[in-house]
Image (cartoon, rainbow, N blue to C red):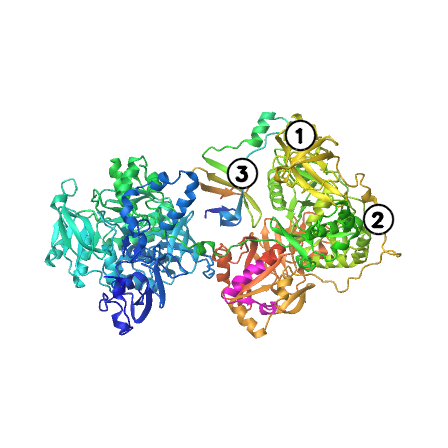
Amino acid sequence: MTSEDEASPHPTGLATSAGRRRLPPRPGEWIDRSQPLHFRFEGCAYYGFAGDTISSALAANGVRLLGRSFKYHRPRGIYSLANHDVNVLVSDGSHTNLRADVTPLWDGAELTAVNTFGGLQNDLARHTDKAGNFLPVGFYYKTFHKPRKLFPFWERQMRAMAGLGAIDPKASLRRTAKRYQWCDVVVVGGGPSGLSAAVAAAEQGLDVLLVDEQPHPGGSLLYQHETDVLTMLLKRAGELANLNVMTGTVAAGYYADHWLALVDDERLTKLRAKSVVFATGVFEQPALFRNNDLPGVMLASAAQRLLRLYAVKPFDRPIMLTANADGYRAALDMQQAGIGVRMLVDLRTQGELTDVGQRLEKAGIPVRRGQAVYEASLGSDAIGIDAVTICPLDGDGQPIAKASQRVECDGLLMSVGWAPADSLFCQARGKLTYSRELEQFLPDILPAGVFTAGRLNGVYETAARLADGRRAGIAAAEYVSGREASEVPLPQRIHPLSPPSHPYPVVDHPSGKVFVDLDEDVQLKDIEHAVAEGFDGVELLKRYSTFGMGPSQGKIANTNTIRALARLRGENMGETGSPTARPFFHPVPFGHLAGRGFHPHRETALHAGHVAAGARFLPAGDWLRPAYYEDEKRGEEPFLRSTLRAVPAKGSRPLFSDRERAIFAEVEAVRQRAGLIDVSTLGKLEIAGPDAAEFIERLYTGRFAKMKLGTTRYGLMCDESGVIIDDGVIGRLADDRFYVTTTTSASGSVYREMQRWALVWKLQVILANVTGSFAAMNLAGPQARSILAQVSDVDTSESGFPYLGLREAKVLGVACRILRTGFVGEVGYEIHAPAHWAARLWDGILQAGAPAGIRPFGVEAQRVLRLEKGHVIVSQDTDGLTTPYEAGMEWALKHDKPFFIGGRSLQIVARKPLKRRLVGFTLPREYRGTLPSECHLVIDHGEIVGRVTSIVRSPTLQQAIGMAYVRPSQSTPGMRFEIRGEGGRMVEATVVEMPFYDRTNARQKQQASVVGPEAPKKASAAGLPLRTSPVHEPLQQLRPTWSSEAEMPVAAHIGDPSAQQIVAARLGLADVSALARVTVKGPAAAELVARHEIAVPERIYECRALGGNGIVVRTGRVEFFIEDGWRGQTVERLRQALAKPIPGVLPVWRQDISFLVTGSESESLLSQVCSFNFRDSGDDLVMTQIAGVSCSILKRRWGELTGYQIWSDGTFGPYLWATLMGIVRELGGDAVGTSAVSAP
Amino acid sequence: MKLLTCPINGPRPLSEFVFGGEVRTMPDPVTSSDDDWADYVFNRSGEPGVRREWWYHLASGTWFVAERDNLRDEFLRTYLYGSEGAAP
């Protein structure tokens, strides 16, 4: 019979004739006969019903040949019908490797089998099967690796022949967002023991989740056992509101601390449970004999599934091969369905001793005891078996081949044993032991909080499984509640007269193919050969033979393979052991694993201004920083022309790219006039308290205790081994207060280490990381002084604000800290301003500086400028081994102070000979070639002696300059060394003394050159932005109606006001960054809070109400966070009180992003971005991560509306807004204005 | 994912934490020999057993000490630095 014969040419009598093997309606069937489904398989039209899987519908139509095997392209059909084999993989064009046995059929499906050449029926590769004898295990490893150059060819051939489906690269993208979920007890497996365990645990009042991969709970009760028990169990489960059942969901992996991967059609759910019950049951195992893989050979449980779940008659005249009572029951099932079982072959000489044995004989089915199936025979249609050969077994269980007998049949059912589904249990580090009574591995040592139940425990009888489930469910509940465990009885195993599994259901054949692993076409003889070659450990054997490595992960292969290996090694099963179980239980689509990626990035408060100015960005750690600004006028800069003259262009190709010309123009602006660069990414820390100076002395290599107020010093930080790890500026604001900057990349780690040292040294210091709270910009250039004078009231005279000075002053009305620096080699002012106000300053300074020719400059120009000035960048010009001696920074080490981190190690280093030295170098002015790059090597007499760390074409010096590590003996100015540049070309460089530019620092003394004839007048602040939210730009795109809160524009309405209320009740996202807020920390903070009539929360994270929906939260032992409600004045009152520093209090004027998430779906949103279960937090503040960003989260209520408020560092604001908005919209929500949450 | 219980924030997945190495005491830099100092700076014990380790909760900025059995990768208890003797 071919599949063409089965095609119904005309859809007549749909509802009744969907397949000629379909039985009349049966109780408990999963199919819905009122919903016929049309589909095509391999080009032929068929019909099935809703509730069918692809395989069951094909079986109903009498199609036996459903797939081709992986390696030999042998015909294959239904085997387990339970996803324990992958004989039937199909593709619909866009989804490949669909597991037809368990994939629901859909109307209009167009399906083909995977891995065929020219179709399933006439697969051209089927002849590979004939060559099988020449393809033993390890054949590929041994054959194709020589000659090596031919391997790619053979690899392509092999990959084409062996394999699974093809991927459609044009398939549409489907977002499969991951989700977090929580429960007290999770029960994996919805059979009798699992249901019973779940009910028992739920009756203890716990939050219980039952997970089952089938579309309906019930497990084997659905197709093998009594169904009235199931009805009762399901009724009880339905009554328990705290018992949640997830069907169609695979528990695909177990990870530490009861963390499970649950996979359904839609997504991967990360479940955190407090206790786990594995009621995962058993897999039916095949018998091994020749041709045990052909269509027609089927596990008895698969035939029972076909019969009971899909009302499909599997065969007309099958033979049953068995070694347990289950086989007898299955034969009776068939008989009752009108299937004439020809014969029952029992491997056991004594046969079945329970009453089911007698019932079978009464039913008139002939029984052959002590016999085996020797081989199955392929019919003339080359599609499936038409007969089997049976033969008696001798006393050792060996077949007596000469006494064999051929029996015609259309199918062979096997029920010879079971293997526990112990993969998850083993992933949980449970230990197994082998039971000879049951011939099965059983759980032996249970990890804490892990329990097992049912057939996995070796409990087979239905009533005992229910009792065992109950026992496990109660034990799990007691574990979660922390109650003293009641006397938990061990599983009640009713030991059968003979074990449910046969110890060795194997009949070898001298020449035929006997398969142990159908996925990978691994034969019994492959196992024997591999063992003979020495691959005789279970793990080695797995890797060499590939058993258990296919898509079904050995579910029906491992046990028989281990039985064979144990026999070959002369051991028992327990000694041989099982291969390590790893996730996943079933393969999981990559799309599910990818889910939604979270890649947090930070944007400075000036980001929108950079975009508007044509910035080209480059990533710097978490940040995006402007590399340079595109400028249409770049070609006309006189300065650039002189540079171009020095290096004449050839032909039509411009010598410099647009990028380089833009960078040169920015350099020129800073050197000649003024430039403004965003340096907000610098780490910024506050250190306060009586021991602050002492603390800094210990952390940094220099001397700081006697620094005058209003001054700054360079700070170099080493680790304990004396390696440079960071540098920055240390400014003294008061005797007990310092403001410290760090490099961009080290801000987090430096602050972390400071916190730790403060604990270890027990010093009285208060620390705050204010990196995100302060935006910073460096105004530099000969005109910087006069521009600052226009925008600020600070005295800009050289005596009033000298080099390395620090001032607290207002700039354009905003209170700022201004640091006089010289990083780029000109007069420079680093203006540190509260981030919410930064846009005002940036715009205002550029406006005020416009007549003087100011321009914004980027990181690239800054690199050139600082290199000209010879300033080292830590982690570019230093590496993980660089000491201050190597970097030429011994001047920064003050060894005469009692201690600094790294000092002791540097004393030792100082006594040893120096191995390398960082020097400045130039290339000859007439050098025309490609510049060497950073990390190009310095070569001396064929040896690597160092590398280039920085190199640029300096427009100021009109030649290439750089820094490099060289031998100390080469480091004297004037000496030459060689760099191996691009393509191995050697380039000669000359050591020069640094800095390259302004060696006497005269530029710092330069007095303001006033633009125009008049003295600088104050710049107008009219039209400049006020405070702006970190998400002002994305809000503006929503065209809201603006109002104002604490000088910040606030999106009050977005869209129609009544529609907005509906959105807010479902899922709304509102920006409330405008609310005034402050953190006060320090030993006197509680007293300050109390003095301002603010309720002082006692517990850490306890939240108390201020008037008007404001809050105060204790965020640490001596730390409070205060946020006003709309129009609140508390924070302003605190600001006035703190205008004069209060000892023992460090205020942090937080420049956060703050969102409200409102409505009934707010938990759905959070469950996609946050692993915290908010049921655990009560009404307290939670500090955790959202979408990879550290956030604080608090449950809130606004009138009828409930939801959450989220705070984070403002620099993550645009990222968080975009990420949350994407999910909000997927969940049917939207952005809402603040009026939706009762803002005025 | 493994859970670690921060004394302030409660049980959280390991991804919320930064490992800070073993809790070790710095020898007196003035009196210790070069060799003893180098041993402190460069050598770490890989011995199996219960170790006192520094851990840092990122979102709240909390340093604390965890006692961990590094053979079984099991946290035994956690506490704030300096409160080792305090009731858990």
**Observer-nearest residue: A428 or A66?**
A66
Three-letter amino acid code at the position of disc 2: Ser
Answer yes or no: is residue A835 visible: yes
For label 3, the residue is B21
Mark 1 touches mark 3? (CB < 8 Å): no
Q: Is residue A944 left or right of residue A119?
A: right
Q: Position of residue A594 (x, y in %)?
A: 47, 54
Where does the magenta region start and end? A1216-1240
Q: Position of residue A1094 (x, y in %)?
A: 63, 58
Quote the CA–CA distance across marks 1 and 3. Answer: 35 Å
Quote the CA–CA distance across marks 3 and 2. Answer: 50 Å
Q: Is residue A555 left or right of residue A825?
A: left
Quote the CA–CA distance across marks 2 and 1. Answer: 44 Å
**Observer-nearest residue: A536 or A1191?**
A536
Protein chain holding label 1: A
Answer yes or no: is residue A227 visible: no
Q: Position of residue A1160 (x, y in %)?
A: 49, 66
Q: Which mark is residue A967?
A: 1
Q: Is residue A1220 magenta?
A: yes
Q: Which mark is residue A381?
A: none
Three-letter amino acid code at the position of disc 1: Arg
Within 10 Å of the Cα at label 3, are there few (<14), some (14-19), or many (20+) other Cα atoms?
A: few
- Badge 2 and badge 1 in a common chain: yes
Q: Is label 1 in a helix, a strand or a loop?
A: loop
Three-letter amino acid code at the position of disc 3: Gly
Within 10 Å of the Cα at label 1, are there few (<14), some (14-19), or many (20+) other Cα atoms?
A: many
Q: Is label 3 in a helix, a strand or a loop?
A: strand
For label 2, the residue is A797
Q: Is residue A74 left or right of residue B7?
A: left
A437 is higher (above) or lower (below) than A1158: above
